[in-house]
Image (cartoon, coloured by chain):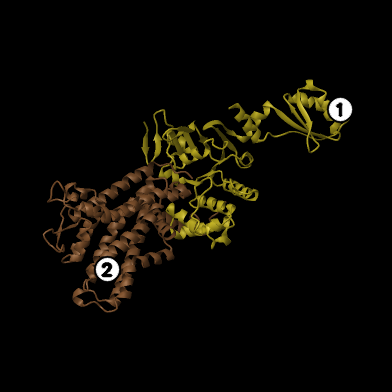
């Protein structure tokens, strides 16, 4: 009985072509790219979701477009001062990252609970290939969203307001977003591999994000007060909280990226970064408008720390997933 | 200790059979064991089984919870083996090489509901490294084979249970496997769907070996030449169905007799208890059913009755013992 009548028949011209293809293509590239494409187009992509995320990420620039009736005088027209903070807080931390977490959390655990992972692991594809292709698909999808969102922001700005620092703004955002996406994406995906329930994999990173935000408003102001044991130090410094403060490291890396593209960091940005612990107010300044850079960690060290933490979590998550029994 | 290259066993020192011997078996396991361990409880799901599956179509029988799915999941590499070893055509179970050789349909297979059957099959083919053009051609051929060629625009979520099962079966064939492992392929299907899947499995068995698990004995009887019966994680028997029937029908023979005067014959049979007749009764079909331990005596009795009463025989044959009876008998023994 020969089921394959067409091009798929063994011995036909096309099948000969298949046998001639390199074993790298057959064993690695084709399975990897097929999982990548399936994750990208079937699991992640939906037009409605895409439009919603891009609009949500651009609320700032849309509001700017609506409310700035007249162009700002050239000497004050700096996009990083006007949109930069909104971009990092709103577009990334409140919109893009939660959506990324939402998508990554279900990526492995959902496939296991739905039973489709059993099909995947019975095929000649290793678990690391499944995991990496899925992660790469998530990263690519959200990078594309990020790029589109930046494009929308830039177009809106170009139409309405000729900013001085469009290019450095664009480049710094372009460089910083992958770092954030990698960190939160890989962490959530690791939890998705290690934990049984999608809810748990979703909840932990969301709690981390909320904690990072709430700490800025509720805990850090208290920690930045002079310490009663040593008036020269804040509680934040005295107890060396910065070692464990994820918010500090995330913003320290952001500061490092800004330094790469901007000749100097504006006062408003310094003020914003001071609430995260990257800068501190100069106590001798009666107006509190002078900021000093805290050099607890260099931006590169913070980056290495973030990458190491996330990669370590990924390795642990993957080892748990590798040993996990996959049943339907 | 054995020498292993690319997960193939080439040589052994008494403990592991040589590669050629393993290769002759579609599935070969020794002391295959699975223990599920939670914080407090240890559950022995599969208990040191030695499974030998020769080419052909092999049934894997057992009641619910016997350990069939666990065994199959170990063979396909989805779950870890606690103890022992398993080989698929000479390749260690769960290795990439072994997974290349098998087509696996799990119990209650899950699908990506938003995909069309064609896209799903292409995706499955690409997991085996097939180029897209080849994968598409094969997927179309398979859809045609399973009578789904008209359904290419529908998503799998819109399919009926029977259609989904056909897609599942098609996905196991896309890479031309050497061995099909089917875990309860007819569960949750209506009688029409069941018949259709059984017919496909029979057709496929001409080209490849099939290892099929089920707790529906009549289906296994229709499909398989050889069976392994698993109870409480242990293999209680592996044999050809024909041999099993011969073996177990000796213990208790059941005959059916149809004459032109069944009432009279039954009366005579019941009055001759000393002739080795254990039980005799009139069936719903109006024929006489006899259970005897001494078939020769029964034959002599029937022939003497015919001669004495001048009765004509329409039918007299031994009833084939259904697999179900053998299964129940073996279960009772256990």
The one nearer the camera, A267 or B275, is: A267
Q: Secondary structure at mark 1?
A: helix
Q: Is residue B253 left or right of residue B135?
A: right
Is residue B26 at least partly visible in the picture? no
- Which residue is most to the left? A284
Judging by the rendered image, the residue that carries numbered circle 1 is B307
x and y, in percent, of residue B118 in the image: 51, 59
x and y, in percent, of residue A17 in the image: 43, 58
- Neighbour tally class for label 1: few under 14, some 14-19, many 20 plus, Cα within 10 Å: few
Up the image or down, B231 lies above or below B181; here it is: above
Q: Which chain is yellow?
A: B
Chain A tint as drawn: brown
Determine which of the numbered discs, if any, sits on residue B267 in the image. none
Residue at 35% x, 64% y: name it: A145
Up the image or down, A245 lies above or below B50; here it is: below
- Neighbour tally class for label 2: few under 14, some 14-19, many 20 plus, Cα within 10 Å: some
The quarter holding residue A63 reads bottom left
Q: Secondary structure at mark 2?
A: helix
Indicate the chain on which mark 2 is placed: A
Up the image or down, B79 lies above or below B161; here it is: above
Residue at 58% x, 62% y: name it: B150
Up the image or down, B79 lies above or below A202; here it is: above
| Tag nearer the camera, 1 or 2 | 2
Q: Is residue B167 left or right of residue B39?
A: right
Report the Cα–Cα distance between label 1 and label 2.
Answer: 111 Å
Indicate the chain on which mark 1 is placed: B
x and y, in percent, of residue B121 in the image: 49, 56
The one nearer the camera, B237 or A176, is: A176
Judging by the rendered image, the residue that carries numbered circle 2 is A83
Q: How many marks?
A: 2
Residue at 44% x, 45% y: name it: B99
């Amino acid at each position: 009985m020969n089921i394959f009548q067409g091009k798929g028949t063994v011995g036909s011209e096309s099948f000969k072509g298949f046998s001639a293809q390199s074993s790298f293509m057959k064993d690695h590239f084709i399975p990897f790219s097929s999982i990548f494409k399936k994750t990208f187009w079937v699991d992640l992509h939906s037009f409605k979701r895409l439009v919603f995320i891009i609009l949500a990420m651009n609320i700032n620039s849309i509001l700017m477009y609506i409310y700035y009736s007249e162009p700002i005088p050239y000497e004050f027209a700096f996009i990083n001062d006007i949109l930069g903070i909104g971009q990092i807080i709103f577009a990334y931390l409140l919109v893009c990252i939660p959506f990324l977490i939402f998508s990554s959390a279900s990526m492995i655990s959902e496939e296991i609970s739905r039973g489709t992972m059993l099909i995947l692991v019975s095929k000649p594809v290793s678990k690391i290939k499944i995991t990496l292709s899925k992660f790469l698909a998530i990263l690519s999808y959200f990078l594309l969203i990020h790029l589109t969102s930046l494009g929308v922001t830039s177009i809106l700005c170009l139409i309405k307001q000729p900013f001085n620092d469009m290019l450095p703004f664009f480049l710094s955002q372009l460089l910083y977003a992958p770092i954030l996406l990698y960190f939160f994406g890989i962490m959530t995906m690791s939890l998705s591999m290690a934990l049984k329930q999608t809810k748990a994999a979703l909840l932990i990173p969301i709690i981390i994000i909320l904690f990072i935000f709430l700490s800025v408003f509720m805990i850090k102001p208290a920690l930045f007060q002079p310490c009663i044991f040593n008036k020269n130090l804040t509680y934040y410094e005295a107890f060396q909280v910065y070692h464990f403060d994820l918010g500090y490291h995330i913003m320290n890396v952001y500061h490092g990226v800004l330094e790469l593209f901007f000749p100097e960091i504006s006062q408003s940005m310094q003020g914003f970064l001071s609430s995260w612990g990257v800068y501190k107010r100069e106590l001798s300044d009666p107006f509190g408008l002078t900021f000093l850079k805290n050099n607890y960690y260099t931006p590169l060290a913070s980056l290495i720390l973030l990458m190491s933490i996330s990669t370590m979590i990924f390795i642990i998550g993957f080892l748990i997933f590798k040993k996990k029994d996959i049943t339907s | 200790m054995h020498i292993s290259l690319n997960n193939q066993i080439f040589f052994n020192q008494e403990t592991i059979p040589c590669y050629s011997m393993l290769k002759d078996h579609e599935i070969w396991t020794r002391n295959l064991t699975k223990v599920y361990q939670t914080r407090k409880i240890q559950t022995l799901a599969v208990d040191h089984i030695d499974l030998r599956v020769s080419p052909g179509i092999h049934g894997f029988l057992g009641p619910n919870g016997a350990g069939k799915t666990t065994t199959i999941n170990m063979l396909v590499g989805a779950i870890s083996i606690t103890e022992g070893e398993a080989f698929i055509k000479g390749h260690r179970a769960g290795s990439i090489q072994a997974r290349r050789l098998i087509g696996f349909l799990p119990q209650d297979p899950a699908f990506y509901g938003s995909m069309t059957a064609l896209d799903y099959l292409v995706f499955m083919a690409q997991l085996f490294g097939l180029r897209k053009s080849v994968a598409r051609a094969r997927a179309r051929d398979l859809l045609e084979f399973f009578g789904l060629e008209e359904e290419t625009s529908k998503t799998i979520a819109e399919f009926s249970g029977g259609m989904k099962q056909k897609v599942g079966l098609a996905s196991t064939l896309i890479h031309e496997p050497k061995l099909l492992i089917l875990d309860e392929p007819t569960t949750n299907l209506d009688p029409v769907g069941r018949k259709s899947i059984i017919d496909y499995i029979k057709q496929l068995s001409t080209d490849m070996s099939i290892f099929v698990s089920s707790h529906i004995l009549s289906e296994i009887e229709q499909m398989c030449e050889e069976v392994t019966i698993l109870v409480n994680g242990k293999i209680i028997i592996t044999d050809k169905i024909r041999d099993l029937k011969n073996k177990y029908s000796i213990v208790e023979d059941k005959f059916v007799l149809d004459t032109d005067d069944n009432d009279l014959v039954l009366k005579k049979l019941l009055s001759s208890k000393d002739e080795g007749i254990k039980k005799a009764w009139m069936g719903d079909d109006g024929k006489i059913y006899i259970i005897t331990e001494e078939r020769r005596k029964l034959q002599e009795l029937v022939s003497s009755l015919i001669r004495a009463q001048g009765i004509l025989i329409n039918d007299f044959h031994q009833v084939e013992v259904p697999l179900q009876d053998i299964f129940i008998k073996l279960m009772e023994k256990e």
